[in-house]
Image (cartoon, rainbow, N blue to C red):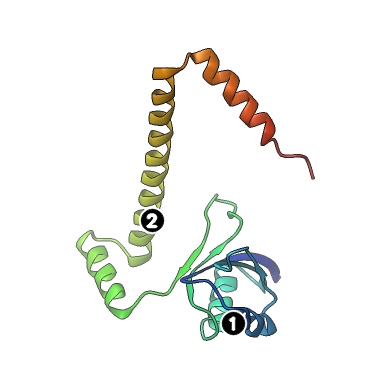
Amino acid sequence: MKRHHAVEILLTRPLSPGELKRASRHVPLAVNADRTRLMALQRAHSPGNALHTLRRRLDPRLPIDVLSTHYADRNGQVRLNVAFSRSDIAAIRRAAAARGQRTAQFLSRRVTAAVAARERDRLRALENQLEDLLTNHTLDDVLVCAGHVLSRHRRTPC
């Protein structure tokens, strides 16, 4: 059964209004404010098929960097569709072979490790900022201030 899959399209540069209009004739698109990210719905049997279909339909019309499923699958995974150059593919295959892995397995592990490292770095930076705050302010002051800021940013239910 075909379902609709939400796909996020990351672009290499902002789109001109004309490019957006031409691409929207082929696929209905939602665009962010700076025209570097788009969203589309694609009917397909699987998320991977949705990404592949959109890549085929939009690649000639848009400067696409990465396509990704907007929602994680049952396993908590987000699917990516990246167009690699021939030299990139050769280098990836060599690296996978050197580790005795299939190319897809190698890429999956490398991307997962990179995302985890990025998250660790982000949290470490936040911890460092908090430590810096605590050198000049009391714990109570920091907590009260955080509470005020968070209450202003509270999301209202839909």
**The N terminus - image quarter:** bottom right
Measured as percent of width and height from the top left, residue 92 is found at 28, 68
Closer to the camera: disc 2 or disc 1?
Answer: 1
Q: Dividing the picture into quarters, in which one does residue 88 lie?
A: bottom left
What residue sits right under mark 2 in the picture? 111
Image: 104 above or below 88: above
Measured as percent of width and height from the top left, residue 130 is found at 44, 26
Measured as percent of width and height from the top left, residue 36 is found at 54, 67
Q: Amino acid at mark 1?
A: Glu
Q: Nearer the viewer, residue 140 or 108?
A: 140
Mark before the other along the chain sequence, 2 or 1:
1
Q: Residues within 10 Å of mark 1 (few under 14, many from 20)?
A: few
Q: Dividing the picture into quarters, in which one does residue 54 lie?
A: bottom right
Q: Is residue 117 left or right of residue 68?
A: left
What residue sits right under mark 1 in the picture? 19
Q: Residues within 10 Å of mark 2 (few under 14, many from 20)?
A: few
Q: Nearer the viewer, residue 150 or 100?
A: 150
Q: Nearer the viewer, residue 4 or 29?
A: 29
How far is the residue under mark 2 from the one under mark 1?
31 Å
Residue at disc 1, secondary structure: helix
What's the residue at 53%, 71% (across, down)? Answer: 14
Residue at disc 2, secondary structure: helix
Label total for image: 2
Measured as percent of width and height from the top left, residue 69 is found at 57, 62
